[in-house]
Amino acid sequence: MKICGIDEAGRGPVIGPLVIAGICFDEKDAEELVRLNVRDSKLIPPKKREELFEKLIKIAKSYKIISIQADEIDNKNTAGINLNHLEAMKAAEIINELQPNVIYVDSPTSPKASKFGEMIREHLKNKDVDIHAEHKADLNHRQVGAASILAKVTRDAEIEKLKKEVKLDFGSGYVADPITQKFVEEHWENKLSKYIRHSWGNIKKLKNSKAQQKLNFED
């Protein structure tokens, strides 16, 4: 039986991609995941995460990683597709390709975790597949922990590549980070704005504030 874990990295940041990963293991590989002490990527140091990434893709039956760039997040949001629905659509894309027997997926919401599972099911070719959507599933299921490692390592690599590309330090990418705030304020209107999630509430506030300042200046 093929068991798949699905998790994401990068839901909250205002800069960079949202990465969703799915990884499938044979039922007999459960002991190997225990031996490797696979768990939520946030509990593992960066270097160890990278080492585990290589080991996990070797023992996995199959895996798939999807990076959703800032402009796609914004475009979907404009079309009325929020982040939860977008994540469900991409999770379904992973499931449709990997075709596991059982799926454990980390739900972004706690009270309505099962609803997230049904959102995924809407986009599946096989509507009868066994889906378990749980909040904090990466803490309870090693397959989901493995997916979180793939997603986190991939996003971290993309962020480092992005920093080299823009030749600027934009900090952690979270709006609470002063370095990120400075980058956003200086570049939300220029060619680097494509890396910024303009549909985020704090960016909308910044745009409104700048527009008001411009009006006041013109008055």
Image (cartoon, rainbow, N blue to C red):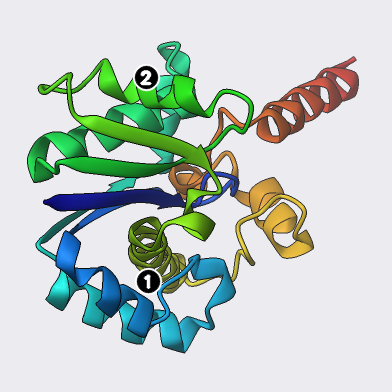
How far is the residue under mark 1 from the one under mark 2? 29 Å
Q: Position of residue 218 (x, y in %)?
A: 84, 19
**In this rendering, is residue 17 above or below 208?**
below
**In this rendering, is residue 210 above or below 40?**
above
Type of residue at label 2? Met
Q: Position of residue 145 (x, y in %)?
A: 42, 62
Q: Position of residue 34 (x, y in %)?
A: 37, 77
Answer yes or no: is residue 144 visible.
Answer: yes
Q: Nearer the viewer, residue 23 or 191?
A: 23
Q: Position of residue 123 (x, y in %)?
A: 22, 19
Position of 72 compared to 174: left or right?
left
> According to the image, label 2 marks what residue?
119
Closer to the N terminus: mark 1 or mark 2? Answer: 2
Secondary structure found at label 2: helix
Position of 68 compared to 152: left or right?
left
**In this rendering, is residue 118 above or below 1?**
above
Position of 5 compared to 95: left or right?
right
Corner quadrant of residue 151: bottom left
The mark tally for this picture is 2
What residue appears at the point 57 percent right and 23 percent down from the top-left corner? 112
Quadrant of the snapshot with the C terminus: top right
What residue appears at the point 26 percent right and 79 percent down from the top-left corner? 32
> According to the image, label 1 marks what residue?
157
Secondary structure found at label 1: helix
